[in-house]
Amino acid sequence: MRPTLSIETLPLAQVTDSIDTEWEESIVRRRDRRRTITVQANPLPGATMPMMREAVLEKLEEVELPPGYKWEWGGEWEDTVDAQASLIPMTVPAIIIIAFILVYL
């Protein structure tokens, strides 16, 4: 024989006098050990990242931030800048080697 479960409803006022709600950050996001707010966007079909960046750059630069705050580009833009910066040190030796090969031929 199975035991039967009895489910009864009860007015909330019988259990508590009031309910207080307040906002709370459940996760504090950090980047380089600093609190951060991340803003994301989905591009329009056919739009490239440089086109979208140029469209909003002027308006973002007009925003005055309080002392101690700053904003910086991350994501695809940061990856692009890092990749281009890593190519620069090898550009001069590559050009010298190409010139040497051309002269040798």
Image: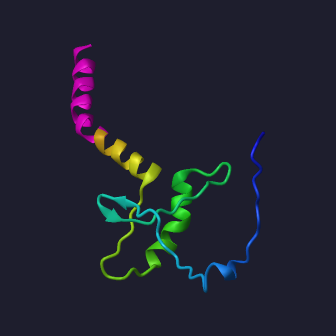
Nearest the eye: 79 or 102: 79
Identified at 34% across, 75% down, the residue is 69
User: Where residue 39 sits in the image (x, y, percent)?
Assistant: 51, 63
Magenta residues span: 87-105
Please give the name of the residue rendered at 46% of the width and 79% of the height, measured from the top-left corner: 62
Residue 44 sits in which quadrant? bottom right
Say if 74 sits above or below 24 in the image: above
Name the residue at the bottom extreme: 17
Estimate the x, y position of residue 64 in percent, counting from the top left.
41, 82
Indicate the quadrant where residue 87 lies: top left
Residue at 77 percent across and 50 percent down: it is 4
In which quadrant is the N terminus drawn?
top right
Q: Nearer the viewer, residue 45 or 88?
A: 45
**Residue 59 lies in the magenta stretch:** no
Residue furthest top in the image: 105
**Of helix, strand and loop, which mostly describes the magenta segment?**
helix
97 sits to left or right of 79: left
Vertical order, 88 against 78 (above or below): above
Number of marks: 0
Q: Depth check: 87 or 4 in front?
A: 4
Is 101 in the magenta? yes
Residue 45 against residue 10 in the figure, above or below: above
